[in-house]
Amino acid sequence: MSFLFKRNPKTPQEIVRAVNESVIKLDSSVGDSQKKYQDECSRYLKQMKVILIGDDENAPQPDQISYLAQEIYSTDSLYLLIYHLKKLDFDSRKDVQLIFSNLLRRQLANKSPTVDYIINSKPEIILMLLKGPETHSIGLISGQILRDCLKFEIINKFILGNSLFWNFFKYVQIPIFEIATDSFITLHDLLTTHRKLVSEFLNNNYDQFVININKLMQSSNYVTKRQSVRLLSEIILQKYNQNSKYFDEATNLKIIMLILNDKSKNLQIEGFQIFKFFIAKPKKSQKVLDILVKNKENFIAFFKGFDIESYQIPNLVEERDYILGKIQQLPDIERIQ
């Protein structure tokens, strides 16, 4: 924390104001001028980071952190930094992520002042982060900050309630592999971190969710297809979602049957984790039952040859045998005389 020992060191409040001024000047600067303000931002962000987490010589001081945080909130510094994120250099973007993450974890009387500030004063910060994958240079940093935010249920709820959430079903198909992969991590966390919240969300948005996840499961991209099948499987395995009407719809069953028939054994196994619920459900819809009965002999032949012993997945062989037994108990299709 050597900068604190200069003859006229800047206070935490002055550092925040200085970084705000520098980042705003990036808007109208180009060339050497822009580089100058990028360097200034970099220097002040590093000073903010040291106040928050300390360095090799000095531990963070609670009063300095408090002054810094209050100035960040009162001047909307987090908003300014996220708004101008793409104009900062690479190291500064990483510093913004670290500063943001540390502020989120800061607790006062079992509350997170940063979360309260974002939700009550500047939800626009979350909206900007939700659009991060659209700007490839900041997509990964935006994704990391967003995932740090959604660890808090109130922010996860805000995101699920915003129409921008549904864009992630498109972002996961972006041709840039790193951005698509990072977007899928975010989508996964949004739909699995706070399980009861997600269950309520899915009950209220079932049709839109199923349309989107079914599209992904029929993607020509193997990675997209497998990740989406795995995501659906994980959601279904949550106890809050096991009575979903998903298993009453013939369209869903047909898509899972296609996945079971995929040439990839890994995809077949992912598909099986969903298919077993169609079979095991005690009360099946008539449309689903008709398809199962019609394909009974094909299912029996398939599962008798479904060689999965080598995968060493706990209980998988037992589940296969159980499902095969349930299929064999299905009524035979009525044959026309």
Image (cartoon, rainbow, N blue to C red):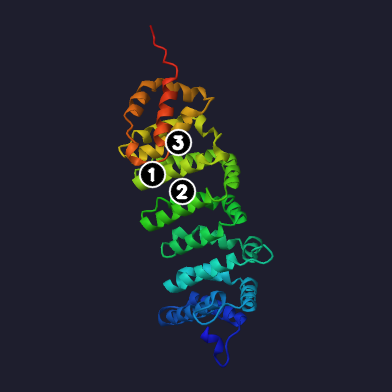
* For residue 34, above or below residue 326: below
Give the residue drawn at x 59%, y 50%.
161
Of label 2 and label 1, which has the lower sequence position?
Answer: 2
Disc 2 target residue: 169
One can see residue 157 in this view: yes
Disc 3 target residue: 274
Task: Please state the horizontal and vertical placement of residue 11, each as a whole percent of the image.
Answer: 61, 84
Give the residue drawn at x 41%, y 36%.
316
Q: CA distance from mark 3 to mark 2?
A: 20 Å
- Disc 3 marks a residue whose amino acid type is Ile
Identify which residue, 80 or 192, lies in the foreground: 192
From the viewer's perspective, is the residue at label 2 or at label 1 nearer? Answer: 1
Give the residue drawn at x 53%, y 38%.
207
Say which quarter of the image contains residue 254: top left
Say which quarter of the image contains residue 67: bottom right
- Cβ atoms at labels 1 and 3 below 8 Å apart: no
Identify which residue, 35 or 242, lies in the foreground: 242
From the viewer's perspective, is the residue at label 1 or at label 3 nearer? Answer: 3
Say which quarter of the image contains residue 294: top left
Characterize the local packing of mark 1: few (<14), some (14-19) or many (20 or more) Cα atoms within 10 angstroms.
many
From the viewer's perspective, is the residue at label 3 or at label 2 nearer? Answer: 3
Image check: 216 left or right of 237? left
One can see residue 176 in this view: no
Task: Please state the horizontal and vertical placement of residue 284, each as a whole percent of the image.
Answer: 52, 25
Of label 1 and label 3, which has the lower sequence position?
Answer: 1
Q: CA distance from mark 2 to mark 1?
A: 14 Å
Secondary structure of residue under mark 1: helix
Residue 226 is marked as: 1
Of label 3 and label 2, which has the lower sequence position?
Answer: 2
Q: CA distance from mark 1 to mark 3?
A: 13 Å
Secondary structure of residue under mark 3: helix
- Disc 1 marks a residue whose amino acid type is Arg
